[in-house]
Image (cartoon, rainbow, N blue to C red):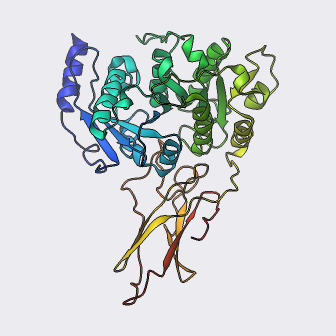
Amino acid sequence: MLRSLILAFICTTLSAQQPPYNEPPNVEPPYYRVRYEASTKKGECVFPVSHTLWLPPAVEKLRGVIVHQHGCGEGSCRSGQTGAFDLHWQALAAAHQCALLAPSYEQPQDADCQMWCDPRNGSGATFERALIELGNECGHPELATAPWALWGHSGGGHWAGGMLLLHPERVAAVWLRSGVPTFQPIDGRAIEPHQISAGSLRVPIMCNFGTKEGFTVKGSRFSGVWPSNEKFFKAMRRQNALIAIAADPLTSHECGNQRYLAIPWFDACLKRRLPQQPDQPLRNLDLASGTTVPWQQVSQQQTSLAPPLDSIWLPSETIARAWKQYIDDTQIIDSSPPPAPTNLTLVGDQLTWQATADLQSGIAQFLVQRDGVIIATIPEKPKRSFGRPLFQGLQYSDTPSMPLVKMSCTVPPAAAGQSNPYQVLAVNTMGMISQQQ
């Protein structure tokens, strides 16, 4: 009875959008959004939630959907509003003819996160409903049955891991940043553990967390993250799961530079897991499909663990090298220049352009040239809030800062009859500059 009263109160309070959830970025194609109100029905989600979708250009039939799931708390939930607008994650999605989806749960700061981050509490069913409705809205009904690549932070990792264990046949790969699913009883909490299914053992999994989350620094607010990751890893690896661990040497619970390993890791996994043709099942992988790395490199100490617990699984030797760089200092090397900006347009004193992010290193800034001379950098000083400075900025849960920045610059107008004298170059986060066009 008490639980019903609490849920009714939550749902009544959140029946309409209110700060900080009342000003999400506007959507128009290629962006789409559906929003669901809170529910008081048993088994349905007690928080309002919006699902925002981005479609890559010129895709006849989608091969999958990449899901970027924020964590718990008001700030993280709000940051989910910009997840689908992330140029770097869009580059990954476009490379594999996938949609990019970002949910945003409208959870009050002190409300119980389990009411959405456990997908069995209605969020899983709402997610599947959103795929159906978004697919119909954008003209891609195959979204309803397309495979999922799941990324989740904190409570979002709990959610993504729960969806893996509930629906392994739908999941191409899953990245768990600072959060894993509940698979064992928790003292003092009435949370039913998920069951580890045979199908989940064949899905590539990465457990990623900050070293200050109980790995090398003990007693912090998030010191329980590493022990829960270690238990999940051992439970899965003991059954020969395709699972790895990557400890971020620079961070605590914030996401830091993880995207520079996560996006190439997903790229490698999707190349091998997505079917050649839509409507076919995911391709299977096994231990021999990738490479294993000794646990000693993970733990940075000697270990007496017996196989298979003495190693992690990675999809390729290339990813293994990037993984080693990541756990050393997160500075994964990229020597390739980013794609050159396109559709450069000058109207009066307003210069605009479009750009695709570098799949490996994203976009840090743009250089505006006039007659071959740099006259402006956009932004002049990229902000370094979390991880490397990015053109779009970066919030705690790995999403672009709000308000969203635009690819535009105020410049001296061209003289009458003069062609556009401007050129724009992209700079990735490793300092590589796009080629002149």
Pick the residue in front: 320 or 116: 320
Horizontal arrangement in the rendering, residue 349 relative to residue 436 (left or right): left
Number of marks in the rendered image:
0
Image quadrant where residue 109 sits: top left
Image quadrant where residue 274 sits: top right
Regarding residue 280, the answer to whether it shows in the image is yes
Horizontal arrangement in the rendering, residue 299 relative to residue 410 (left or right): right
Q: Quadrant of the C terminus?
A: bottom right
Q: What percent of the width, then of the height, locates residue 6?
A: 23, 20
Residue at the extreme bottom: 416
Instruction: Please determine whether, in this image, residue 218 is positioned above or below residue 192.
Output: below
Horizontal arrangement in the rendering, residue 405 relative to residue 11 (left or right): right
Q: What percent of the width, then of the height, locates residue 278?
A: 47, 30
Regarding residue 154, the answer to whether it shows in the image is no
At horizontal 66% and vertical 11% (from top left) the residue drawn is: 239
At horizontal 38% and vertical 22% (from top left) the residue drawn is: 114
Pick the residue in front: 403 or 143: 143
At horizontal 45% and vertical 29% (from top left) the residue drawn is: 155
At horizontal 47% and vertical 22% (from top left) the residue drawn is: 170
